[in-house]
Amino acid sequence: MAAHTTGRAPVAQGFALLVGVVFLALGIGGFATSGELLGFHTGTLLNLTRTAVGLLALVAAWKGPSARILGLVVFFGLLGITVWGLLSAGTGGPGDVRRLFDPAWTDNALHGVVAVLGLVVFLLPTRTRNTEGV
């Protein structure tokens, strides 16, 4: 009697695919516009980050285990960006944190929600399949 443990492939891969498509569209679309795209701020560093996250997520969507690990990577990465964005949105002085990276409140909401979803996808229990012969 052998049990084979697999990752939560359908959920994790669906999450990775959705994150990949959305972030890649926002990243590439941000280079085509200036200022805002669908309510989200654009900037060179922000667009590069979104494009990189989108590409990484699309690559991770190919396999279940890598898609689960993407959930953890997305959690920590986007949590950091969310904290930075909250500091940026909450300060107003000319020498503040906005000079490097300028996410808006909509960006913070997107990054925060996707970060939490990434953690949920990573923490979902793995499935166990019974692979014994008949």
Image (cartoon, rainbow, N blue to C red):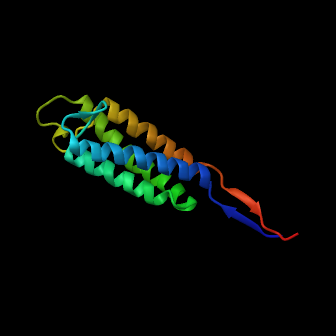
Q: Is residue 66 above or below residue 30?
A: below
Query: Is any part of residue 13 visible from this angle?
Result: yes
Q: Position of residue 14 (x, y in %)?
A: 54, 48
Relative horizontal placement of residue 86, taking residue 91 as reference (left or right): right
Q: Position of residue 105 (x, y in %)?
A: 32, 30
Relative horizontal placement of residue 27, taking residue 32 as reference (left or right): right
Q: Quadrant of the N terminus?
A: bottom right
Q: How many marks?
A: 0
Q: Quadrant of residue 104?
A: top left
Closer-to-camera residue (111/85): 111
Closer-to-camera residue (64/117): 64
Q: Quadrant of the C terminus?
A: bottom right
* Residue at image location 11% in from the left, 33% down from the top: 94
* Residue at image location 59% in from the left, 48% down from the top: 11
Relative horizontal placement of residue 7, taking residue 59 as reference (left or right): right
* Residue at image location 51% in from the left, 60% down from the top: 62
* Residue at image location 35% in from the left, 39% down from the top: 82
Residue at the limit of the structure toward the right, as seen here: 134
Q: Position of residue 116 (x, y in %)?
A: 48, 41
Q: Position of residue 35 (x, y in %)?
A: 19, 34
